[in-house]
Amino acid sequence: MTAYSSEMAEQSIISRYPVAAFFVIAYAFSWAIGGLLIADRQGVLSAPQALHYVSAFGPAVAALIVTAFIGGRAGLAELGRRVVRFDVGRRWWLIGVGTPLALALAAMIVYALSSGSLPDLALFGEVDYLGNIGPLAALGLWIVTYGFGEETGWRGFAFHRMESGGWVRAAVLIGLLWGLWHLPYFFYKANFMALGVGGFVAYLVSITMGSILLAWLYRSSGHSILMVALWHGLFDFVSASPVAEGTGSAVISGVVIMWVIAILRPTARRR
Protein backbone atom coordinates (compact mmCIF):
# COMPACT_ATOMS: atom_id res chain seq x y z
CA MET A 1 0.00 0.00 0.00
CA THR A 2 1.44 3.38 -0.99
CA ALA A 3 1.68 6.30 1.41
CA TYR A 4 -1.11 8.06 -0.50
CA SER A 5 -3.49 5.09 -0.35
CA SER A 6 -2.69 4.61 3.34
CA GLU A 7 -3.57 8.26 4.00
CA MET A 8 -6.83 7.86 2.08
CA ALA A 9 -7.71 4.78 4.14
CA GLU A 10 -7.11 6.70 7.38
CA GLN A 11 -9.28 9.57 6.15
CA SER A 12 -12.02 7.11 5.27
CA ILE A 13 -11.96 5.50 8.71
CA ILE A 14 -12.05 8.88 10.46
CA SER A 15 -14.87 10.05 8.18
CA ARG A 16 -16.91 6.92 8.90
CA TYR A 17 -16.29 6.89 12.65
CA PRO A 18 -15.47 10.47 13.67
CA VAL A 19 -16.59 10.16 17.29
CA ALA A 20 -14.70 6.91 17.83
CA ALA A 21 -11.63 8.45 16.19
CA PHE A 22 -11.95 11.44 18.49
CA PHE A 23 -11.89 9.28 21.63
CA VAL A 24 -8.95 7.20 20.37
CA ILE A 25 -6.86 10.30 19.66
CA ALA A 26 -7.86 12.04 22.91
CA TYR A 27 -6.92 8.99 24.96
CA ALA A 28 -3.71 8.38 23.02
CA PHE A 29 -2.48 11.96 23.49
CA SER A 30 -3.33 12.25 27.18
CA TRP A 31 -2.41 8.70 28.19
CA ALA A 32 0.99 8.98 26.47
CA ILE A 33 1.74 11.90 28.78
CA GLY A 34 0.15 10.06 31.70
CA GLY A 35 2.43 7.11 31.00
CA LEU A 36 5.49 9.36 31.29
CA LEU A 37 4.25 10.70 34.61
CA ILE A 38 3.53 7.19 35.92
CA ALA A 39 7.06 6.16 34.91
CA ASP A 40 8.39 9.24 36.71
CA ARG A 41 6.39 8.29 39.81
CA GLN A 42 7.88 4.80 39.70
CA GLY A 43 11.39 6.15 39.26
CA VAL A 44 11.80 4.59 35.82
CA LEU A 45 12.60 7.93 34.19
CA SER A 46 12.49 11.62 34.94
CA ALA A 47 9.66 13.71 33.46
CA PRO A 48 8.50 17.25 34.30
CA GLN A 49 5.44 16.89 36.51
CA ALA A 50 3.94 20.01 34.95
CA LEU A 51 3.22 17.80 31.91
CA HIS A 52 0.11 16.93 33.88
CA TYR A 53 -1.45 20.14 32.57
CA VAL A 54 -0.40 19.45 28.98
CA SER A 55 -2.34 16.16 29.09
CA ALA A 56 -5.53 18.22 29.46
CA PHE A 57 -5.26 19.24 25.79
CA GLY A 58 -5.90 15.70 24.52
CA PRO A 59 -9.63 16.29 23.84
CA ALA A 60 -8.98 19.63 22.11
CA VAL A 61 -6.22 18.16 19.96
CA ALA A 62 -8.47 15.25 19.01
CA ALA A 63 -11.36 17.60 18.16
CA LEU A 64 -9.15 19.74 15.92
CA ILE A 65 -7.59 16.75 14.12
CA VAL A 66 -10.87 14.97 13.42
CA THR A 67 -12.66 18.19 12.47
CA ALA A 68 -9.87 19.06 10.03
CA PHE A 69 -10.15 15.60 8.45
CA ILE A 70 -13.90 15.58 8.03
CA GLY A 71 -14.77 19.27 7.74
CA GLY A 72 -11.67 21.03 6.50
CA ARG A 73 -11.38 24.77 6.97
CA ALA A 74 -15.14 25.25 7.09
CA GLY A 75 -15.45 22.70 9.89
CA LEU A 76 -12.62 24.28 11.87
CA ALA A 77 -14.16 27.73 11.40
CA GLU A 78 -17.51 26.49 12.69
CA LEU A 79 -15.81 24.89 15.71
CA GLY A 80 -13.92 28.13 16.32
CA ARG A 81 -17.15 30.14 16.31
CA ARG A 82 -18.54 27.95 19.06
CA VAL A 83 -15.30 28.30 21.05
CA VAL A 84 -15.75 32.08 21.22
CA ARG A 85 -19.57 32.25 21.24
CA PHE A 86 -20.31 34.88 23.88
CA ASP A 87 -23.74 36.15 22.77
CA VAL A 88 -25.62 33.74 25.00
CA GLY A 89 -27.64 36.19 27.08
CA ARG A 90 -27.20 37.45 30.62
CA ARG A 91 -28.82 34.39 32.18
CA TRP A 92 -26.23 31.98 30.83
CA TRP A 93 -23.35 34.29 31.63
CA LEU A 94 -24.67 34.42 35.18
CA ILE A 95 -24.90 30.63 35.34
CA GLY A 96 -21.65 29.96 33.50
CA VAL A 97 -19.56 32.33 35.60
CA GLY A 98 -21.70 33.10 38.63
CA THR A 99 -22.42 29.58 39.90
CA PRO A 100 -18.75 28.51 40.21
CA LEU A 101 -18.06 31.76 42.06
CA ALA A 102 -20.99 30.99 44.35
CA LEU A 103 -19.42 27.58 45.00
CA ALA A 104 -16.17 29.36 45.84
CA LEU A 105 -18.04 31.47 48.39
CA ALA A 106 -19.61 28.32 49.85
CA ALA A 107 -16.18 26.69 50.13
CA MET A 108 -14.83 29.78 51.91
CA ILE A 109 -17.73 29.77 54.38
CA VAL A 110 -17.19 26.08 55.14
CA TYR A 111 -13.46 26.72 55.57
CA ALA A 112 -14.16 29.59 57.97
CA LEU A 113 -16.63 27.54 60.02
CA SER A 114 -14.30 24.55 60.27
CA SER A 115 -11.07 26.46 60.95
CA GLY A 116 -12.39 29.44 62.85
CA SER A 117 -10.78 31.95 60.49
CA LEU A 118 -11.29 33.29 57.00
CA PRO A 119 -9.18 31.62 54.32
CA ASP A 120 -6.22 33.43 52.83
CA LEU A 121 -7.23 34.18 49.23
CA ALA A 122 -3.66 33.37 48.20
CA LEU A 123 -4.58 29.71 48.75
CA PHE A 124 -6.48 29.84 45.47
CA GLY A 125 -3.10 30.29 43.79
CA GLU A 126 -1.81 26.92 45.01
CA VAL A 127 -1.47 24.56 42.04
CA ASP A 128 -0.16 21.00 42.10
CA TYR A 129 3.35 20.64 40.65
CA LEU A 130 3.72 24.41 40.17
CA GLY A 131 3.40 25.73 43.72
CA ASN A 132 1.75 29.07 44.47
CA ILE A 133 1.58 30.91 41.16
CA GLY A 134 -0.99 33.43 42.36
CA PRO A 135 -4.79 33.30 42.07
CA LEU A 136 -5.01 35.06 38.69
CA ALA A 137 -2.37 32.86 37.07
CA ALA A 138 -3.98 29.76 38.57
CA LEU A 139 -7.38 30.81 37.26
CA GLY A 140 -5.95 31.36 33.79
CA LEU A 141 -4.20 27.98 33.92
CA TRP A 142 -7.39 26.12 34.82
CA ILE A 143 -9.49 27.86 32.18
CA VAL A 144 -6.98 27.31 29.37
CA THR A 145 -6.11 23.68 30.22
CA TYR A 146 -9.00 21.87 31.84
CA GLY A 147 -11.47 24.45 30.56
CA PHE A 148 -10.82 24.87 26.84
CA GLY A 149 -8.43 21.91 26.63
CA GLU A 150 -11.18 19.53 27.68
CA GLU A 151 -14.43 21.23 26.70
CA THR A 152 -13.47 21.87 23.07
CA GLY A 153 -13.46 18.07 22.81
CA TRP A 154 -15.92 16.58 25.30
CA ARG A 155 -18.80 18.98 24.73
CA GLY A 156 -17.69 20.89 21.62
CA PHE A 157 -17.03 17.79 19.52
CA ALA A 158 -18.22 14.53 21.10
CA PHE A 159 -21.45 15.70 22.72
CA HIS A 160 -22.18 18.02 19.81
CA ARG A 161 -22.28 14.99 17.52
CA MET A 162 -23.94 12.56 19.92
CA GLU A 163 -26.76 14.62 21.41
CA SER A 164 -29.19 13.87 18.56
CA GLY A 165 -29.52 10.34 19.94
CA GLY A 166 -30.76 11.71 23.27
CA TRP A 167 -28.86 14.34 25.20
CA VAL A 168 -28.98 12.65 28.62
CA ARG A 169 -27.83 9.33 27.18
CA ALA A 170 -25.00 11.08 25.34
CA ALA A 171 -23.98 12.99 28.46
CA VAL A 172 -23.88 9.82 30.58
CA LEU A 173 -21.83 7.89 28.01
CA ILE A 174 -19.38 10.77 27.62
CA GLY A 175 -19.24 11.10 31.40
CA LEU A 176 -18.13 7.49 31.79
CA LEU A 177 -15.53 7.80 29.02
CA TRP A 178 -14.42 11.14 30.46
CA GLY A 179 -13.96 9.52 33.84
CA LEU A 180 -11.93 6.65 32.38
CA TRP A 181 -9.78 9.22 30.55
CA HIS A 182 -8.57 10.29 34.01
CA LEU A 183 -7.40 6.74 34.85
CA PRO A 184 -3.63 7.52 34.68
CA TYR A 185 -4.14 10.07 37.47
CA PHE A 186 -4.87 7.17 39.82
CA PHE A 187 -1.31 5.90 39.27
CA TYR A 188 0.72 9.10 39.67
CA LYS A 189 -1.33 11.87 41.33
CA ALA A 190 -1.31 11.56 45.12
CA ASN A 191 -4.86 12.75 45.85
CA PHE A 192 -6.30 10.42 43.20
CA MET A 193 -4.17 7.46 44.34
CA ALA A 194 -5.53 7.92 47.86
CA LEU A 195 -9.07 7.25 46.61
CA GLY A 196 -8.45 3.57 45.85
CA VAL A 197 -10.77 1.32 43.83
CA GLY A 198 -13.92 2.37 45.65
CA GLY A 199 -12.98 5.98 45.22
CA PHE A 200 -12.51 5.44 41.49
CA VAL A 201 -16.08 4.14 41.19
CA ALA A 202 -17.39 7.12 43.16
CA TYR A 203 -15.31 9.40 40.95
CA LEU A 204 -16.93 7.93 37.83
CA VAL A 205 -20.36 8.67 39.28
CA SER A 206 -19.47 12.23 40.23
CA ILE A 207 -17.84 13.08 36.91
CA THR A 208 -20.83 11.63 35.04
CA MET A 209 -23.04 14.00 37.01
CA GLY A 210 -20.71 16.80 35.96
CA SER A 211 -21.03 15.67 32.35
CA ILE A 212 -24.81 15.97 32.55
CA LEU A 213 -24.53 19.46 34.03
CA LEU A 214 -22.08 20.66 31.38
CA ALA A 215 -24.12 19.10 28.57
CA TRP A 216 -27.19 20.94 29.84
CA LEU A 217 -25.26 24.22 29.98
CA TYR A 218 -23.81 23.64 26.52
CA ARG A 219 -27.25 23.02 24.98
CA SER A 220 -28.93 25.83 26.87
CA SER A 221 -26.31 28.41 25.92
CA GLY A 222 -26.71 27.76 22.21
CA HIS A 223 -23.78 25.34 21.97
CA SER A 224 -21.26 27.78 23.41
CA ILE A 225 -17.96 26.07 24.16
CA LEU A 226 -16.89 29.32 25.83
CA MET A 227 -19.56 28.96 28.52
CA VAL A 228 -18.75 25.37 29.45
CA ALA A 229 -15.00 26.06 29.33
CA LEU A 230 -15.38 28.99 31.72
CA TRP A 231 -17.61 26.98 34.07
CA HIS A 232 -15.26 23.99 34.02
CA GLY A 233 -12.13 26.10 34.53
CA LEU A 234 -13.69 28.12 37.35
CA PHE A 235 -15.01 24.99 39.04
CA ASP A 236 -11.57 23.33 38.98
CA PHE A 237 -9.98 26.57 40.20
CA VAL A 238 -12.23 26.40 43.26
CA SER A 239 -12.44 22.65 43.89
CA ALA A 240 -8.71 21.96 43.42
CA SER A 241 -7.61 24.70 45.81
CA PRO A 242 -6.71 24.05 49.48
CA VAL A 243 -9.72 26.17 50.43
CA ALA A 244 -12.07 23.42 49.23
CA GLU A 245 -10.28 20.46 50.78
CA GLY A 246 -12.28 18.06 52.93
CA THR A 247 -15.73 19.28 53.93
CA GLY A 248 -15.72 22.10 51.40
CA SER A 249 -15.22 19.64 48.55
CA ALA A 250 -18.06 17.47 49.83
CA VAL A 251 -20.38 20.48 50.02
CA ILE A 252 -19.51 21.55 46.47
CA SER A 253 -20.09 18.03 45.15
CA GLY A 254 -23.41 17.80 46.99
CA VAL A 255 -24.61 21.07 45.47
CA VAL A 256 -23.70 19.91 41.96
CA ILE A 257 -25.50 16.58 42.46
CA MET A 258 -28.66 18.32 43.67
CA TRP A 259 -28.45 20.71 40.72
CA VAL A 260 -28.22 17.81 38.26
CA ILE A 261 -31.20 16.10 39.88
CA ALA A 262 -33.19 19.33 39.43
CA ILE A 263 -32.13 19.47 35.76
CA LEU A 264 -33.20 15.87 35.14
CA ARG A 265 -36.57 16.02 36.90
CA PRO A 266 -38.48 17.64 33.99
CA THR A 267 -37.04 15.06 31.60
CA ALA A 268 -38.02 12.22 33.92
CA ARG A 269 -41.58 13.58 34.27
CA ARG A 270 -42.01 13.77 30.48
CA ARG A 271 -40.89 10.17 30.14
Image (tube, rainbow, N blue to C red):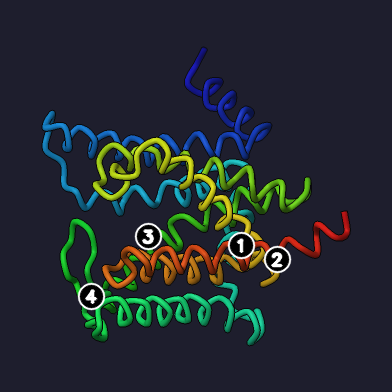
Work out whether 111 lies above or below 218. below
Q: Choose the circle earlier in sequence order: 1 or 2.
A: 1
Which of pointers 1 and 3 lies earlier in the amino acid sequence?
3
The residue that mark 1 highlights is 213
- x 67%, y 53%: residue: 160
- Labelled pair 4, 1 in contact (Cβ < 8 Å): no
Q: Amino acid at mark 3?
A: Thr
Instruction: Classify mark 3: residues with Cα within 10 Å, few (<14), some (14-19) or many (20+).
Output: many
Which is nearer the N-term, disc 4 or disc 1? 4
Q: For this view, does 248 lie left or right of residue 255?
A: left
Give the residue at mark 3. 145
- Where is residue 200? Give x, y as percent: 42, 41
Element marked by disc 3: helix
Q: Which mark is residue 123?
A: 4
Q: Are marks 1 and 2 in contact (CB under 8 Å)?
A: yes
Q: In the image, which is nearer the foreground, mark 1 or mark 3?
A: 1
Residue 178, position in %: x, y?
Answer: 51, 45
Q: CA distance from mark 4 to mark 3?
A: 20 Å
Tag 2 and tag 3, C-beta contact below 8 Å: no
In the rendered image of this protein, does residue 208 appear above or below residue 80? Answer: above
Residue position for label 2 = 263
As measured in the structure, the alpha-carbon distance from the residue carrying label 4 to the one carrying label 1 is: 27 Å
